[in-house]
């Protein structure tokens, strides 16, 4: 007969019967031993008083025994009828009436699936069957105390609680009426400190969740897929023994027995798929050739154990592009996914991420993030490869069709493919909407190179220049530019750069603020801008302070270069592709009638003396009509070029040589 159920009549009137009755009232009720066994400080043993009178534990000398560890309840601990105390194993702390701590001296952690046992004795005579009050063994037979419990008739030799459904955060709880493994269950919703409720083995929740699935850049042109995990919970969690799997069962198991697998509150870690590396804190490597690349339709799942199709093992799940992952059913049964649901990944670029942007379960928590940040929080600004480096806004509008935007590749040793990128601004025709130019499939920027986009102008695309055709010019007084990596121009997860200038250009600024690449209300001042000025990026941040007004634009070059020389032909002052009488008139008008200044001063310096004066139109007219000498190189009838020895004048922009 079970000691737990032999109390009726045992609490008699004679003093001789009182002590044994009190002993029989005390039982091991629940054990949370943190199944992966590394997460020290999470192990708890609940001891209950199942009788109808209070028991003073200290006065009776009760002991917990899991050799070589042994621990005696301190004096003064009393458990009322139906009450419990919780003993925190291998952990120091300040004892209360219901919370006790064994300390760490002479202690060890309780083991999990490899097998262990716990005994409750009324004295420290651990080999005496007359002194044992309760016993439970799990995972495997043959643990210390089994023979004593068997001899006392409270356990069957060789019997143990099956931990086949054990997962992180589960306990084993007493939910029966006898003294056998069948009277214990694996409980996914532990109830330490309260009466044991119905065991729910299927849906124990690890606080660790899938946080991002994407690609990590490790060098020029070198990328590999990664899975990011995050612990948003308030407790230290152990990844040891858990699994990451792709939908076709390419899988990786975290190592056990190492503190590297401990993930604290708010911490994230990366699993590097298909590459070699040395495991360490926050980084784990599956090994070369063990995983394929991510596909347009795919799934990733996080498990406490195998088989992966068992819903009791599923800790988190995400699928994108389509339904039909082998583990979708299990995730749905576990309450982590809705059958037939998937993340729409139509706008995902080849190295875009699937990222968690919320809480809860299911596809609603996930988004396509083409500016993914593996290894970092999902809401930090993107690590961008391309920036809007300079904008030539032609403030006075005297040279229509000269609006230009320069894009700069920040990467070393790697070409950036721009096909599908969108350069956008607020539509002048339909205010409140974006008007965008989709960069052609062939558009690319060499490592640390530049691409100049000519807005609202037709031309033949080249390696360094593209033409939008009919679009619109930038407004020099107040405007903004957006650079998206894909067609989803309403999604901040596609926005990689933004530039705003002037007081009235806050249209869609919220996208940039949400993406973390612009401060609310920030704007570059254009008070000092003049004709042929540009707005140039000269900082390293994402704010107006990183830009300046540049009176000597340098489209296609670094913004801090000393020589700002575009190729030109000397004498073609008005930049119409040839040197003729119109150039002399253009220059005379500038010099003496307040006419427009050309952007290429060197082209107007006909005699090459680094001064624009009356001698320049005289020299040009003499060459054209009087048989005078040809201007210095680069000559008007030859190939475009630059000065061999640049002087004080410059050539900031010269379209005829593009």
Image: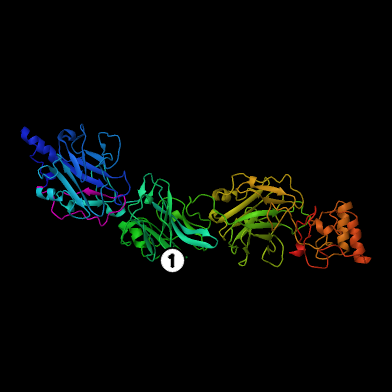
18 or 630: nearer the viewer = 630
Q: Residues within 10 Å of mark 1 (few under 14, many from 20)?
A: some
614 within the magenta span: no
Q: Give the range drawn in magenta.
A: 152-176
Point out residue 619 in the picture as x, y percentages from the top left corner. Answer: 90, 60
Q: Does the magenta-highlighted stretch encompass residue 159?
A: yes
Residue at the spot x=64%, y=51% of the render?
Answer: 499
Q: Quadrant of residue 65?
A: top left
> Front-most of 15 and 286?
286
Q: What element carries label 1?
A: loop
For label 1, the residue is 292
Image position, residue 610 (x, y; %): 84, 54
Above/below status of 633 relative to 88:
below
Question: Can you say which quadrant of the picture contains the C terminus?
Answer: bottom right
Q: Residue at x 61, y 44 (%)?
A: 521
Residue 344 seen anywhere in this rendered image of the structure: no
């Amino acid at each position: 007969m079970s000691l737990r159920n032999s109390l009726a009549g045992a609490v008699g009137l004679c003093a001789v019967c009182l002590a044994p009755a009190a002993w029989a009232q005390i039982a091991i009720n629940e054990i949370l031993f943190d199944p992966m066994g590394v997460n020290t400080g999470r192990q708890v043993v609940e001891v209950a008083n199942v009788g109808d009178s209070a028991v003073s534990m200290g006065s009776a000398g009760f002991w917990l025994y899991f050799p070589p560890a042994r621990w005696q309840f301190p004096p003064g601990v009393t458990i009322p009828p139906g009450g419990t105390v919780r003993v925190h194993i291998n952990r120091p702390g300040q004892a209360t009436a219901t919370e006790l701590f064994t300390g760490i001296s002479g202690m060890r952690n309780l083991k999990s699936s490899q097998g262990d046992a716990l005994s409750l004795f009324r004295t420290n005579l651990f080999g005496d069957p007359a002194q044992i009050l309760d016993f439970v063994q799990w995972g495997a037979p043959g643990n210390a105390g089994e023979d004593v419990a068997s001899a006392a008739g409270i356990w069957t030799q060789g019997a143990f609680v099956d931990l086949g459904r054990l997962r992180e955060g589960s306990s084993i709880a007493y939910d029966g009426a006898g003294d056998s493994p069948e009277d214990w269950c694996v409980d996914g919703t532990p109830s330490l400190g309260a009466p044991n409720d119905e065991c729910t083995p299927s849906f124990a929740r690890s606080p660790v969740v899938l946080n991002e699935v994407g690609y990590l850049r490790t060098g020029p042109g070198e990328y590999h897929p990664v899975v990011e995990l995050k612990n948003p919970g308030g407790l230290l969690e152990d990844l040891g023994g858990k699994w990451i799997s792709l939908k076709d069962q390419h899988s990786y198991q975290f190592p056990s027995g190492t503190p590297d697998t401990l993930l604290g509150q708010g911490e994230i870690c990366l699993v590097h798929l298909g590459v070699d590396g040395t495991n360490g804190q926050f980084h784990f490597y599956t090994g070369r050739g063990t995983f394929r690349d991510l596909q347009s339709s795919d799934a990733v799942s996080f498990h406490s154990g195998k088989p992966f199709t068992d819903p009791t093992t599923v800790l988190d799940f995400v699928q994108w592009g389509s339904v039909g992952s082998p583990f979708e059913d299990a995730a749905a049964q576990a309450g982590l996914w809705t059958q037939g649901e998937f993340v729409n990944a139509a706008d995902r670029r080849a190295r875009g991420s699937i990222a968690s942007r919320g809480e809860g379960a299911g596809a609603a928590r996930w988004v396509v993030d083409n500016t993914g940040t593996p290894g970092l929080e999902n809401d930090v600004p993107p690590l961008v490869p391309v920036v809007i480096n300079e904008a030539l806004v032609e403030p006075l509008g005297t040279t229509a069709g000269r609006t230009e935007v320069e894009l700069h590749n920040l990467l070393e040793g790697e070409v950036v493919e721009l096909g599908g990128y969108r350069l956008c601004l607020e539509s002048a025709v339909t205010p409140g909407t974006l008007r965008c130019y989709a960069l052609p499939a062939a558009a690319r920027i060499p490592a640390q190179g530049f691409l100049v986009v000519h807005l609202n102008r037709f031309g033949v695309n080249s390696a360094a220049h593209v033409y939008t055709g009919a679009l619109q010019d930038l407004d020099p007084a107040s405007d903004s530019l957006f650079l998206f990596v894909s067609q989803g121009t309403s999604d901040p997860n596609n926005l990689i750069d933004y530039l705003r200038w002037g007081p009235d250009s806050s249209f869609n600024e919220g996208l940039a603020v949400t993406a973390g690449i612009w401060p609310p209300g920030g704007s570059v001042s254009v008070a000092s801008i003049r004709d042929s000025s540009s707005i140039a990026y000269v900082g390293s941040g994402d704010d107006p302070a990183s830009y300046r007004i540049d009176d000597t634009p340098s489209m296609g070059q670094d913004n801090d270069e000393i020589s700002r020389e575009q190729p030109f032909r000397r004498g073609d002052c008005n930049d119409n592709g040839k040197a003729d009488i119109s150039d002399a008139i253009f220059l005379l008008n500038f010099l003496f009638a307040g006419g427009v200044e050309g952007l290429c001063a060197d082209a107007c310096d006909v005699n090459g003396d680094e001064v624009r004066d009356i001698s320049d139109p005289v020299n040009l007219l003499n060459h054209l009509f009087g048989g005078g000498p040809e201007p210095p190189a680069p000559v008007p009838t030859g190939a475009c070029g630059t000065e061999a020895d640049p002087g004080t004048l410059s050539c900031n922009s010269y379209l005829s040589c593009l």
